[in-house]
Amino acid sequence: MNQQPAPPRRLHRAGILVALMLFGVVWLVFTFPDPAQIDRRSLIALAVVIVLAAFGGIAFSWRRYFGRR
């Protein structure tokens, strides 16, 4: 099989994606009004949203870049 390196565009997109995720986490940390008031239900809801977004992003990328083989 012919294993070619990934085009620079894919690496650029991956870098931008990582930067945006880090920015989102930092923004979330700095915008919490009072971390002591966050209850268990809020943390569970946040975790569900993050997991669903991650699965959606992986499924989109997988279908777009690896589904045609």
Image (spheres, helix red, strand yellow):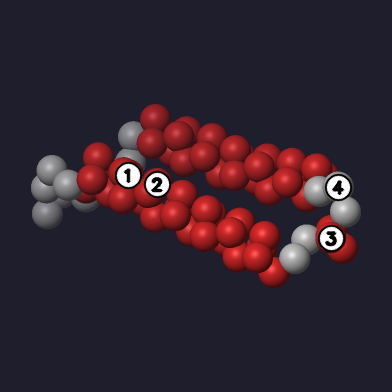
Please name whichever residue, 39 or 14, is drawn nearer the observer in this view of the structure. Answer: 39
The residue most toward the bottom is 40
> Badge 3 is on which residue?
37
Tell me whether the residue at label 1 lies in contact with that at label 3, contact meaning CB atoms closer than 8 angstroms.
Answer: no
Residue type indicated by callout 2 = Gly
Q: Disc 2 and disc 1: Cα gap in Å?
A: 6 Å
Residue type indicated by callout 4 = Pro
| Callout 3 crowding tier (Cα within 10 Å): few <14, some 14–19, many ≥20 | few
Please name whichever residue, 48 or 59, is drawn nearer the observer in this view of the structure. Answer: 48
> Badge 1 is on which residue?
61
| Callout 1 crowding tier (Cα within 10 Å): few <14, some 14–19, many ≥20 | few
Which mark sits nearer the N-terminus, 3 or 2?
3
Identify the secondary structure beneath mark 4: loop
Q: Disc 4 and disc 3: Cα gap in Å?
A: 8 Å
Tell me whether the residue at label 3 lies in contact with that at label 2, contact meaning CB atoms closer than 8 angstroms.
Answer: no
Q: In which quarter of the image is residue 1?
A: bottom left
Identify the secondary structure beneath mark 2: helix
> Badge 2 is on which residue?
57
Residue 31: where, in percent of width, then height?
Answer: 80, 43
| Callout 2 crowding tier (Cα within 10 Å): few <14, some 14–19, many ≥20 | few
